[in-house]
Amino acid sequence: MPVPMVFISSTFLEFEDERRILQSKLTKTLPVGCRLAEYLSCETPELEEKLKRCIDEADVVVLLLGIRYGSGPGEISWTEREVKYALERDKRVLAYMKQQEPPPTVVDIDIKKQEALQRFKAYVKEKIGNIPRFSDTYDLIALAVRDIHGIVKEFERTTYEEGFDG
């Protein structure tokens, strides 16, 4: 039986540990597949195509927001590109925002990036509505497992019903 695919999107430096832990907990707790961009090793033009393919194959995109905008080719970060592409494809996007301040070494000192992050957060909020906040990794896992569990149940119902249509 096919399982829902999850793609986790965030800035790398700020959420490196949370991404790995969340991927592990989701795949051990729920019948889902889970992909992270850092496992796609390639050059910039190829990377964008691989990211798009991962998002196309995903049933849900999990976005982690914090205080970094991130990097990417040109003015738009990889994270923003991923989320905008997912929303253009009508993918379900679950966003979670970190409450606590990360260490100062993680903060963007570039004013343009800080402004871009604020615009990106406003865009996400406009597109998907309320963004739950998490205070630590355990809180994030609890929120994401709860939300993705509901998606798994919908996926199973739909897959079951489609089996009777053929």
Image (spheres, grey):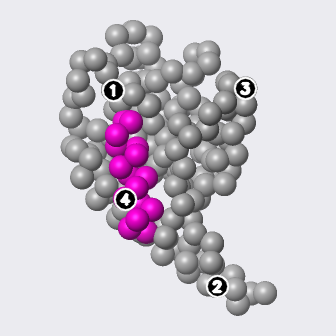
First reached walking from the N terminus: tag 2 or tag 3 = 3
Q: Identify the residue position indicated by label 4 in the image.
A: 25
* Residue range corresponding to the magenta coloring: 15-30
Q: Identify the residue position indicated by label 1 in the image.
A: 67
Foreground label between 2 and 3: 3
Quadrant for the N terminus in the image: bottom right
Q: Local crowd at mark 1 within 10 Å, few (<14), some, or many (≥20)?
A: many
Q: Do the residues under discs 3 and 1 have CB atoms within 8 angstroms?
A: no
First reached walking from the N terminus: tag 3 or tag 4 = 4
Q: Secondary structure at mark 2?
A: helix
The image quadrant that residue 113 belongs to is top left
Q: CA distance from mark 4 to mark 1?
A: 24 Å
Q: Identify the residue position indicated by label 2 in the image.
A: 161
Q: Total of numbered circles in the picture?
A: 4
As shown in the figure, which amino acid type bears the numbered disc 3?
Answer: Pro
Q: Identify the residue position indicated by label 3 in the image.
A: 45
In the depicted view, which residue is nearer to us: 89 or 125? 89
Residue 63 sits above or below residue 75 on the image: below
Residue in the image at 61% along x and 55% along y = 58
Q: Secondary structure at mark 4?
A: helix
Q: CA distance from mark 2 to mark 1?
A: 42 Å
Q: CA distance from mark 2 to mark 3?
A: 40 Å
As shown in the figure, which amino acid type bears the numbered disc 2?
Answer: Glu
As shown in the figure, which amino acid type bears the numbered disc 4?
Answer: Lys
Q: Is residue 105 left or right of residue 19?
A: left
- Residue 161 visible: yes
